[in-house]
Image (cartoon, rainbow, N blue to C red):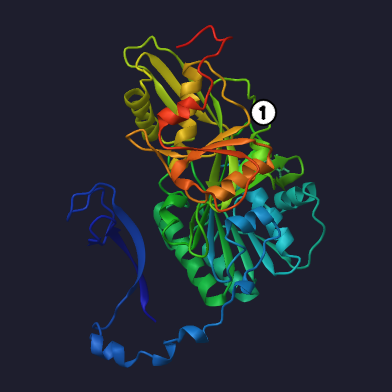
């Protein structure tokens, strides 16, 4: 049998070194060497021709001979989780669940594991908590006994893999990848080489045995390098569990999915009895919306395939600094700067003496430009201290010329708005006519100037403006 030996490979230029060094001697990159285990070749390398002669042609498959149907997907029992996965787990796939410590990753997968164990053989590998701790949490969550639900409290990777290979489960959950280690590597648990090695071996096991595997990975606010980020390209699906520490709802976002759409969002509420699914997130996010406030706008966003109404708030106020402050939470900072520039140039809104804060209520990060018009209108509304019509939705991308550009899937967004009682929508002219009928009043606009004509021109009650 080939012997295993250690090598250090530069992540920048792939140069190989027999020992660890702070700096790569080939490309001079710092801290780029990473430990790898390789099989030592005792005899000479076979020529390509010799290798080819041993290749088995039966491995060539015709597309129609491969057995797979969407019906093979395994459901987790949590609809919000299945939605994020694109309709359940694909057998043999490897799913990474990342999130900050304490956000609820273990709780989520423990609940899912219990529900899955009603029909599938599930092993929950806990490398962080003892079996007793998990049992205590399971009792708190109200789980009854389940014959198909097994726990393994272990941190050594080779033991875990050996047990999994023998036990042949259908689903495995590894909690967490930072706590598991391979004793053949010199580095500590949680280091880049350890987590990559564990991920690699879990991937092999899942593919070979058709096990749906989950890996839990912690991320830190300061961007821990050995966190899930380094594993993203290796796994099939990447989900992140997010939320604000002092608010109870949690978002499950799909960052990558080889078997479905990205940007899907699952919404949960953390309660005393574990996570509860939120099937109508728009209602949750609008629960505290006060339409009488200036600077507040509702935008029908699309998260993956799901329309969600989101409140965007802006606050503009007199700045006492040489450089006025701009701060954004939930939309990209650069996008905000661009919109401020467009507002100044195209509609003459001068924010050069005002600080500007923009916040996407809910903790969602809105990446799509379809929310531009909402952000722009929130700033105008705050600057003029002018509440906008609280039954109106704003939708559209704003170009540098101040033009309002078309958005995708407008019908689904507006349907969600209508469902929640909105009466009016300001939308890009280019999106009209709509493909479906709606009871809402739809106003098409070509540019920001036209949007301004749709709002009240002054607020009698307004006393301050900044
Ligand atoms: P946990 O799943 O342990 O987080 P992670 O695995 O991401 O580190 O969640 C821990 C938090 O969740 C903890 O602060 C307590 C809270 N929690 C509840 O509020 N309700 C519950 O029913 C459970 C089990 C946990
Ligand atoms: Mg945990």
Q: Report if the beta carbon of the residue with label 1 is closer than 8 angstroms to ligand 1.
A: no
Left or right of residue 53: residue 224: right
Judge whether 321 appears above or below 197 on screen: above
Q: Residues within 10 Å of mark 1 (few under 14, many from 20)?
A: few
Instruction: Please identify the quarter of the rendering in which residue 155 is found.
Output: bottom right
Q: Is residue 31 visible?
A: yes
* Residue drawn at 69 percent across, 41 percent down: 270
Judge whether 457 appears above or below 163 on screen: above
Judging from the image, what secondary structure is the residue with disc 1 in? loop
- Ligand 1 located in image quadrant: top right
**Which residue is at the front of the view, 51 or 291?**
291
Number of numbered tags placed on the structure image: 1
**Which residue is at the front of the view, 182 or 250?**
250
* Residue drawn at 54 percent across, 20 percent down: 456
* Residue drawn at 65 percent across, 36 percent down: 422
Judge whether 64 appears above or below 415 on screen: below
Task: Measuring from the top left, give residue 466's x and y in whole percent.
Answer: 45, 12
Judge whether 433 appears above or below 145 on screen: above
Left or right of residue 266: residue 94: left
Left or right of residue 357: residue 150: right
Task: Measuring from the top left, give residue 260's x and y in whole percent.
Answer: 52, 62
The residue that mark 1 highlights is 288
Instruction: Please identify the quarter of the rendering in which residue 115 is found.
Output: bottom right
**Which residue is at the front of the view, 325 or 455?**
455
Task: Measuring from the top left, give residue 429's x and y in whole percent.
Answer: 46, 42
């Amino acid at each position: 049998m080939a012997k295993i030996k250690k090598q250090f490979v530069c992540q920048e230029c792939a140069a190989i070194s027999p020992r660890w060094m702070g700096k790569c001697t080939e490309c001079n990159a710092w801290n780029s060497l990473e430990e790898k285990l390789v099989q030592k070749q005792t005899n000479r390398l076979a020529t390509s021709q010799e290798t080819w002669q041993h290749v088995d042609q039966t491995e060539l498959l015709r597309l129609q001979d491969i057995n797979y149907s969407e019906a093979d997907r395994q459901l987790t029992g949590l609809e919000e989780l299945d939605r994020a996965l694109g309709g359940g787990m694909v057998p043999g796939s490897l799913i990474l669940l990342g999130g900050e410590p304490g956000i609820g990753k273990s709780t989520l997968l423990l609940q899912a594991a219990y529900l899955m164990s009603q029909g599938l053989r599930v092993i929950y590998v806990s490398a962080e908590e003892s079996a007793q701790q998990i049992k205590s949490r399971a009792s708190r969550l109200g789980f009854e006994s389940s014959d198909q639900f097994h726990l393994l409290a272990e941190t050594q990777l080779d033991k875990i893999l050996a047990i999994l290979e023998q036990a042949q489960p259908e689903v495995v959950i590894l909690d967490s990848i930072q706590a598991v280690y391979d004793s053949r590597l010199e580095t500590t648990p949680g280091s880049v080489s350890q987590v990559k090695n564990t991920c690699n071996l879990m991937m092999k096991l899942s593919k070979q045995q058709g096990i749906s595997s989950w890996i839990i990975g912690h991320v830190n606010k300061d961007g821990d390098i050995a966190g899930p980020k380094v594993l993203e390209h290796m796994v099939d699906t990447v989900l992140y569990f997010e939320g604000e520490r002092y608010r109870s709802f949690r978002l499950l976002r799909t960052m990558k999915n080889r078997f479905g759409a990205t940007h899907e969002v699952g919404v949960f509420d953390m309660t005393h009895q574990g996570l509860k699914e939120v099937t109508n997130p728009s209602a949750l996010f609008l629960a505290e919306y006060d339409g009488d406030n200036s600077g507040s706008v509702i935008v029908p966003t699309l998260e993956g395939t799901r329309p969600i109404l989101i409140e965007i708030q802006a606050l503009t106020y007199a700045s006492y600094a040489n450089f006025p402050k701009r701060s954004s939470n939930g939309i990209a900072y650069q996008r905000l700067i661009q919109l401020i520039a467009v507002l100044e140039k195209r509609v003459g809104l001068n924010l050069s003496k005002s600080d500007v804060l923009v916040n996407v209520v809910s903790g969602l990060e809105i990446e799509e430009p379809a929310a531009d018009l909402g952000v722009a209108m929130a700033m105008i509304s705050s600057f003029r201290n002018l509440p906008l019509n609280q039954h109106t939705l704003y939708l559209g991308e704003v170009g540098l010329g101040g033009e309002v550009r078309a958005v995708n899937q407008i019908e689904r967004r507006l349907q969600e708005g209508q469902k929640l009682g909105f009466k009016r929508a300001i939308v890009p002219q280019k999106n009209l006519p709509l493909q479906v009928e709606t009871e809402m009043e739809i106003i098409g606009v070509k540019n920001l100037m036209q949007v301004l004509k749709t709002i009240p021109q002054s607020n009698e009650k307004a006393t301050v403006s900044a």
